[in-house]
Amino acid sequence: MPTMPAGTLYRGKVGMWSWVLHRITGVAIFFFLLVHVLDTALVRLSPEAYNAVISTYKTPLIGLAELGLVAAILFHALNGLRIILIDFWRKGVKYQNLMFWIVIAIALIAFIGFAPRHLSHVFG
Amino acid sequence: MSVVIEQPRSPRNRNQANLEKYGWLYMRLSGALLVILIFGHLFTNLFAGEGIKAIDFAFVGGKWSDPFWKVWDLAMLWLALIHGTNGMRTIVNDYTSKENIRKALVWSLWGICAVLVTLGTLVVFTFDPCPAGALPELLPSFCPTA
């Protein structure tokens, strides 16, 4: 009976899924960044144009999407630090699995701190 | 795929390896800086005070009357767009199978990056927080009232 491969740093388990999540969140943040540079550029046009577009960021639907954006940024930023540690810290590879769960824990705590406050601004 | 698998133990082409190495290094250096810059940006704009509710032309005008936030936002603009474009380039390299499509996509990515970096930089440097003829109630409080 063949046994299941144990998985490596990059195949299966935490190593692979953190890589997948890093890509997905990265692409999402990239497309937001394109829009965000354009909407901010409207300050050069007129106060009315900027305020009109930025008011859509305060609607319930986009307000909820911002929660997703912040969650994506939190994961991508903290997992990026984990990647730096894997590459440059002598014990990085040894602790990459533990570091993934530390990333998730810190991201979750920061998100729980942010979400109610943001929702109260959007819906309050 | 455009990837050429070299013969084992063939001498390394140093010129080609270096560009990708600097790209790899740039992702880590800019990434570390962007964690500080973007967390600071999210804190001041989305968490502190009234959060998203407070953001309007007067808010931006107030922030950009301080050179500190101009430098902060310019650094974010350049570092994040190049970081994001290089990340997208990596993904394009991984998932495209036709060389001309890969080239077209990578060129488009750097083209968009150049346009947005230029646009954003011009906006920050030519921004006027008190434009003439604008409604006074939309402007920062420090603007002279006509």
Image (cartoon, helix red, strand yellow):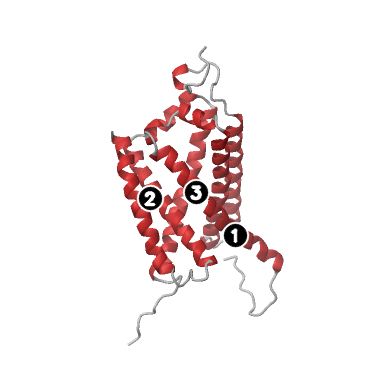
Q: Categorize mark 1 by other alpha carbons within 10 Å: few (<14), some (14-19), many (20+).
A: few
Residue A116: percent from left, percent from top: 30, 43
Q: Name the amino acid, label 1.
A: Leu
Element marked by disc 2: helix
A36 horizontally vs B20: left or right: left
Element marked by disc 1: helix
Mark 3 — residue? Answer: B36
Q: Categorize mark 3 by other alpha carbons within 10 Å: few (<14), some (14-19), many (20+).
A: few
Residue at 47% across, 42% down: B41
Quarter of the image with the N terminus of chain A is bottom left
| Circle on res. B94 | none
Q: Earlier in the sequence, mark 3 or mark 1?
A: 1
Q: Name the amino acid, label 3.
A: Ile
State the residue in front, A9 or B15: A9
Mark 2 — residue? Answer: A71
Q: CA distance from mark 3 to mark 2?
A: 16 Å
